[in-house]
Image (tube, rainbow, N blue to C red):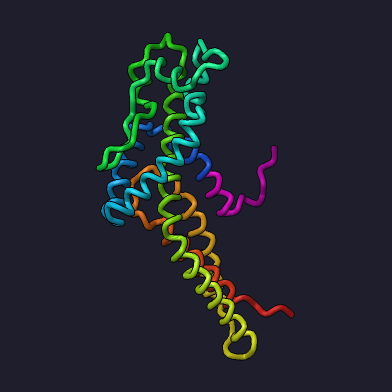
Amino acid sequence: MKPSQKPASLGIQLLVVCIFCAALMPLVGSQFIVQQIGKEQRLILQWYGPARGAQINGSADRWFRGWAVGSGLMTRAIHSFDPRPAAPGADPASSQSTAAVKPLVIHDSAGRFGNLPSASASASASPSDGRPKVWYRWITAVFGLAYFALLRAATLVTWLPMLIPICVSIIVTGYTRQQLKWHGFGGVSPREYRAGSRLMSWFMGIGFAMFFVPGALPPVTVEVCLVLASLGVSLVMSNGAKPA
């Protein structure tokens, strides 16, 4: 096959790299991810205080349990390769308790979070249990990353009443500057336009990726990315060429 004369753009190459990183990231294992969850929960309690921090952590825990634990989704995913699946109509919670899976504790300083299945149990599982260890390690880490996403979403929800007016005011300012420049109060700047385009695209992508990064981050990281992306939108709007 003749090689392509035109290589893929930088954006496409970065997208491919991100897809591979997302596929390989859960291989770090849920034990490491849960340690980082505990660190970020403690950071939230330090940044927002005991009352607000406990509310954020509790919201993330409640969403996760309703989506993954209470519905039995996590149990079915973890034990999908078991040689003897649960009988029809069996309680997922009871099948989980009889699977000889070591508990994994997700908790903050208040210690109110319960047990979740752990990928660390795969290290001591016998090869005859029929469970692929790579799948077990990968899927439990995926649910750990999902917990991270819900934790940061709960933080974002608490900031929305403040973030929405700030982002709207930044974008409206960009639109106002656009109208002023188009009517003779100064020309557009191609340099600012390119800077705004990169600021908008990069920080939108970074902000989305920060939902799933398996490491303790300052609990305002996503919010800062959202504000910077809004600033990029403002620069693009205020420096766009006037239509003919």
Placement of 148 over or under 52, stated as above or below: above
Region in magenta: 1-17
Give residue 215's quadrant in the image: top left
| Nearer the observer, 176 or 23 | 176
- Residue 199 at least partly seen: no
Q: Position of residue 65 (x, y in %)?
A: 44, 35
- Residue 37 at least partly seen: yes
Q: Find the residue positioned furthest to the right.
A: 244
Answer whether residue 7 is magenta in the image.
yes
Residue at 69% over, 37% down: 1
| Nearer the observer, 154 or 152 | 154
Q: Is residue 197 left or right of residue 138?
A: right
Answer whether residue 43 is magenta in the image.
no
Q: Is residue 59 left or right of residue 16?
A: left
Placement of 151 over or under 99, stated as above or below: below
Question: Where, quadrant-wise, is the C terminus in this rendering?
Answer: bottom right
Placement of 158 over or under 181, stated as above or below: above
| Nearer the observer, 29 or 62 | 62
Give residue 31's quadrant in the image: top left
Residue at 43% over, 40% down: 62
Q: Position of residue 226 (x, y in %)?
A: 47, 61
Q: Is residue 57 left or right of residue 50?
A: right
Q: Find the residue positioned furthest to the top.
A: 128
Q: Find the residue positioned furthest to the bottom.
A: 184
Placement of 215 over or under 79, stated as above or below: below
Q: Position of residue 30 (x, y in %)?
A: 37, 32
- Label count reads 0
Residue at 51% over, 54% down: 205
Residue at 28% over, 47% down: 42
